[in-house]
């Protein structure tokens, strides 16, 4: 590789990890605006060891998708946390312990990467049949006077696809 090819490759700009949108099924823009951190999930293969005579090799047998975690800045009244508390309650009712029907609580979530110059979507994936696994505890304390409450939520999903 020479320097001219390298410069040609980056002349349109580099992708910034600080430009993204998370679109939740209810279309609530406050969740999108308050998403503090996100990630693009991984995709791996589950493999099986095989051998043909003396040649050993691995064959892919299925996809493996890792859970993804988002964090959200909370505004007054913690509506961001309440949204996920309610979604968790749609999975397993906190009062009765009743596990709800799968199709009633799974939703698709879209993660968009945005161009840092004009804000247009330049890459997007959709998490298919996602639902929250947890909403960890939030620490509070008198020494945290100048901090904001951050809610972290981990989601599982069946697969992700390019949009």
Image (cartoon, helix red, strand yellow):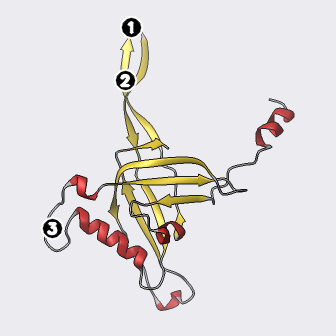
Question: Extreme bottom residue here?
Answer: 142
Question: Extreme right residue here?
Answer: 4
Residue 159 in percent (x, y) is at: 38, 43
| 88 horizontally vs 137: left or right | left
Numbered disc 3: secondary structure: loop
Within-10-Å neighbours for mark 1: few <14, some 14–19, many 20+? few
Residue 123 in percent (x, y) is at: 58, 46
Within-10-Å neighbours for mark 2: few <14, some 14–19, many 20+? few
Looking at the figure, which quarter contains the N terminus?
Answer: top right
Q: Earlier in the sequence, mark 3 or mark 2?
A: 2
Res 47 quadrant in image? top left
Q: Disc 3 marks which residue?
A: 97
Residue 20 in percent (x, y) is at: 58, 58
Q: Nearer the viewer, residue 113 or 38?
A: 113
- In the image, what residue occupies the spot 36% across and 72% down? 83
The residues tagged by marks 1 and 3 sit, at their Cα atoms, a distance apart of 54 Å
Res 135 quadrant in image? bottom left
The residues tagged by marks 3 and 2 sit, at their Cα atoms, a distance apart of 41 Å
- In the image, what residue occupies the spot 68% across and 50% down? 15
Residue 38 in percent (x, y) is at: 52, 59
Q: Disc 1 marks which residue?
A: 53
Q: Disc 2 marks which residue?
A: 49
Q: Is residue 152 visible?
A: yes
The answer to whether mark 2 and mark 1 are in CB contact below 8 A is no
């Amino acid at each position: 590789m020479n320097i001219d090819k390298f410069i040609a490759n980056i002349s349109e700009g580099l992708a910034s990890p600080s430009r993204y949108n998370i679109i939740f099924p209810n279309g609530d823009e406050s969740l999108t605006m308050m998403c503090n951190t996100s990630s693009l999930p991984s995709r791996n293969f589950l493999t099986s060891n095989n051998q043909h005579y003396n040649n050993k090799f691995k064959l892919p047998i299925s996809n493996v998708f890792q859970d993804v975690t988002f964090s959200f800045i909370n505004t007054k009244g913690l509506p961001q946390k309440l949204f996920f508390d309610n979604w968790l309650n749609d999975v397993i009712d906190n009062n009765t312990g009743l596990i709800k029907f799968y199709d009633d609580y799974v939703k698709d979530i879209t993660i968009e990467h945005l161009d840092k110059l004009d804000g247009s979507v330049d890459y997007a994936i959709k998490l298919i049949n996602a639902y929250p696994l947890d909403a960890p505890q939030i620490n509070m304390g008198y020494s945290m006077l100048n901090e904001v409450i951050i809610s972290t939520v981990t989601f599982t999903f069946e697969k992700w696809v390019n949009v």
